[in-house]
Structure formats: C-alpha cells, structure tokens
Amino acid sequence: MEKNTGYFENRPVTMNEHNNLLQIEEHMYQLQDVEKPNAFRNMFPYDEIPKIPFNDRVVPHNMPREIWITDTTFRDGQQSRAPYSTEQIVTIYDYLHKLGGPNGMIRQSEFFLYSKKDRDAVYQCMERGYQFPEVTSWIRASKEDFKLVKEIGMKQTGILVSCSDYHIFMKLKMTRRQAMEHYLSVVKECLDEGISVRCHLEDITRADIYGYVVPFCQELMKLAEQYQLPIIVRACDTMGYGVNYPGAVIPRSVQGIIYAIHTHAGVPHEWIEWHGHNDFYKAVTNSTTAWLYGCAGVNTSLFGIGERTGNTPLEAMVFEYAQLRGTLNGMDTTVITELAEYYEKEIGYQIPPRTPFVGKNFNITRAGIHADGLLKNEEIYNIFDTEKFLKRPVLCAVSNTSGLAGIAHWINTYFRLSGEEKIEKTSELVAYVKTWVDAEYEGGRVTVITDDELLAVIDEGCKTLGITLQKGTVGKEQQ
C-alpha cells in the first residue's frame, strides 16, 4: 500500500517577510467545474431573509501602504438616473480632479463608451491632460466592445467577468470552465494590444471563492506576468451581501474574500479593488473593511448614486480615509459642498436632506437643549469643524423646541456674527422672534420655521427695535 505522505509534507517551507514566521506554501487551487450551479441556498434561500453564518475563521488586518479611491459616477452611477450631458460630465470630472488633490487620491474615473455623448465626454476629459483621475472605461466581455476601447486609445479598460454561478449558469448559460476560457480570451486580446485590464468580478459575494474565483485570479496573474502588464481584480459586491463581521463565512465575509484574493491567488494589494452596493446598508463599512484587510482601491460614486440602493458614496470614503490615516493627503474637502450645490442647482438632483456631509440638514440641530450647547461651544454637537472642511457652518433649525438659545444661534450663524457683534439669547431681538415662533405653534403649527420666514420676522423685529444686523453669506440674503 502506498504511503500517504500528507498534504503539506512535500511543500517547501519559506520565511514570510511580513510577519517573520515560517510558513508552508499554499495549495494552488484548481477550478471546480461543477455540473450544477452552487447557489449557496443555506445562505441565500430566496424565500427567506439571507443568512449570515459563522465559522470563526479570522484573518489578520493587512492594510496596504497606499490606499486610494476610484470613481464610477459616469458608469454605475449613471445607470440609475437620467444620463448626464457631456458638459455636465466634464464639469464633474474637473471637480473630481480638484477634490482628489495633487496626490491623486481619486485615482481613476470610469466611463461608458456606447453612445456618442459618452465618447465625446471621454475625449474632452482626456484632453484636460490630468494625471488623476485617469480616464478609464467599462465594457462587457465582448470582442466587439473591445474595439471601442482600441479606437479611443485608452490605456486600461474594465471588463465584466461575472463570477457567481447565478450569473455563469443562469445568465450566461455556460459552465465555469467555459466562462473562464471566454473571459481569459478577451483579457488576452486586450493585453495583446498593450491595454491593461481591470476585471470586474460581478456578484463575488455569492461566488465559489476557492472553486472559481481564486483559480480564475491565479490565471489572471499568470497573464500579468507573461505580458508584464497589471491586471486589476475588482471584487464586486453587486447585491450588497458582504459583511464585515469577524469569523463570518465566505462568500459573505469581505475580509475573507480579500484575504483569498491576495494570499491564495497572489494578487498584489495595489491590484485589488472593492466595489460595494448598499442593499443592506453596509456599503461604507464594507469598503473600509476591504481597505483594512488588503485592498488598495475602493470604488465609489458621488453621493452614492448607483444601481438600486446605490454604490459606496465617494464623499464618505474621503472622510473614512482621513480617519484611518490621520490626514487628507491633499484632498480638498470643500469641493464636496461645491459638487452638492452643482448637482442641486445645475443638474436638478435633490440630495436627501439627512445625507451625511452633503444633505441640507446634516449639521442642523432642532432640539432646544442641543442648541443651548451649540451656543456655548459648537464642538458639543458638531462632528468636526464643518465650516473649515465643507464650508458648512453648523446650524440650528428653529421650531417650538429651539428656545431662546436656538434662535440666537440661528441668527449668529446666518449673519456670521462673532465677538462683540454676537447676539445673546437675552437679546430683545431674540425675544421678539421667540414670541412670534411661540404664537405659530400655539396656533397648531407642527413644522419647523423656514429660513425665509425667519428672515421676514427678524427684519420686522430689527425695524421695530431699531437694531441693525450685518447681512451674512449663509442661505439667501435679505433683500
């Protein structure tokens, strides 16, 4: 009987330069070309809420030396709204360049190529000559689509390479091997023309990670070495199923997916990118988790606009980066407010008022006790210096619970009064406004007071009391 030498017996032992521990070379995972699709019904029973199982296998933090943001505003972001005009695309692209700063923190922006309008926008953005964001594209795994990339002369393109059995079997009507061979043939055609490839592994959080994803990524790395061109692996959480809980089971575990792609498929940190959706409210936390566990790039769209519940919001990851790194690395966060104003005034997109960082009400408080704290020191109820980073001074909306402190704070903020000019809550003007406010609510009002209403009663009170206020720059100016 032949002696069983064991799984690891003949594998070389090497020193891991990152943790200085001896390790045995990992197994080269083989494609499992199954006859029937693996739908992971134990996790995804369609007639029940999806399950989040655990096996308590954890992986170490492994944040790359450099991390960055990429943008899909003009691709995935544009799939869920009316198309942008060419002029709007170019203007937003200029804003992204300014926001990303001199260090190119917004590394790339991807575009559709199918319409003349989109191609015109691509040409105009490329003519800007910016190093960042690099103009890149997205195509289906089709040789016809690749012709568009070649005609335009792009250095890189993204290719849709759906990786779950839901897509391979049910949509493409292929086997895993057929899908892999098809994808690799399109990738090779791009590489033959000297064009780098970004592979969008669609629906990775329902895919067989070690039976398909890792073997496929290993083949991609062989091609990258053969052609001496980078191949980016974008892990796409298309349905938002990813979770960041330690010990959760793959394919739902974000850190487990990133670990497998980096450690077992051999994809370098700088070639790994995460693309998340917000179906279960986890887009931001999952994107941050991907950074923490070895993914260098996080794909985003402005204000999270994207398919169904949306993508990871670009502005959210700007502030996630700052919190993780302790620096903005050159990013100009005031551009976020400029972009929000452009969307609302020029594009006609209404940002939900409670959206963090950009919504009308994100740093407005309505409770009287909170307003009293803001009047004494705004740090008590403001997340950071929003005026410095977003050109958005903290505000206090006026309602029946605002009290004298809330009204005084609103006046001081709106008219930018400071020092000796500042209005105290004991001011006659504040009392005059509060009398009017109280009368409104005693009459049955239930909504907050609008800016225009406050300006009218303040103007009336100033005339009655003989008070002059210097007009400020927040909100509409008094006429």
Image (cartoon, helix red, strand yellow):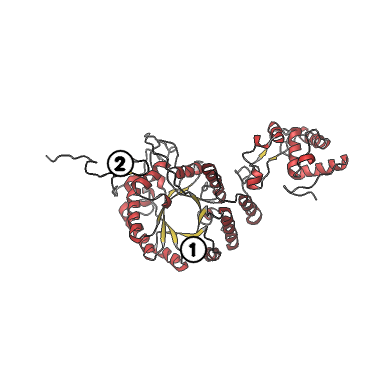
| Residue 114 circle label | 1
Residue at 38% x, 34% y is 56
Q: Is residue 252 visible?
A: no
State whether residue 390 is above or below residue 433. Answer: below
Frontmost of labels 1 and 2 is: 2
Tag count = 2
Q: Is residue 91 found left or right of 148 in the rendered image?
A: right
Query: Mark 2 packing: few (<14 Cα in 10 Å), some, or many (20+)?
Result: few
Say if mark 1 contacts mark 2, CB within 8 Å. Answer: no
Q: Is residue 52 found left or right of 99 in the rendered image?
A: left
| Residue 343 circle label | none
State whether residue 131 is above or below residue 363. Answer: below
Q: Is residue 192 visible?
A: yes
Q: Quadrant of residue 159?
A: bottom left
Q: What's the distance in space between the residues labelled 1 and 2, CA to CA? A: 49 Å
Q: Observer-nearest residue: 202 or 196?
A: 196
State whether residue 158 is above or below residue 282. Answer: below
Residue at 45% x, 66% y is 148
Q: Position of residue 51 (x, y in %)?
A: 42, 36
State the SS at label 2: strand
Q: Residue furthest bottom?
A: 151
Q: Position of residue 28 (x, y in %)?
A: 28, 48
Q: Is residue 72 found left or right of 227 in the rendered image?
A: right
Residue at numbered disc 2: 23
Say whether disc 1 or disc 2 marks the residue closer to the N-terminus. Answer: 2
State the SS at label 1: loop
Q: Quadrant of residue 346?
A: bottom right
Q: Position of residue 101 (x, y in %)?
A: 56, 54
Which amino acid type is shown beneath numbered disc 2? Gln
Which amino acid type is shown beneath numbered disc 1? Tyr
Q: Quadrant of the image for the N terminus?
A: top left
Q: Residue furthest top?
A: 369
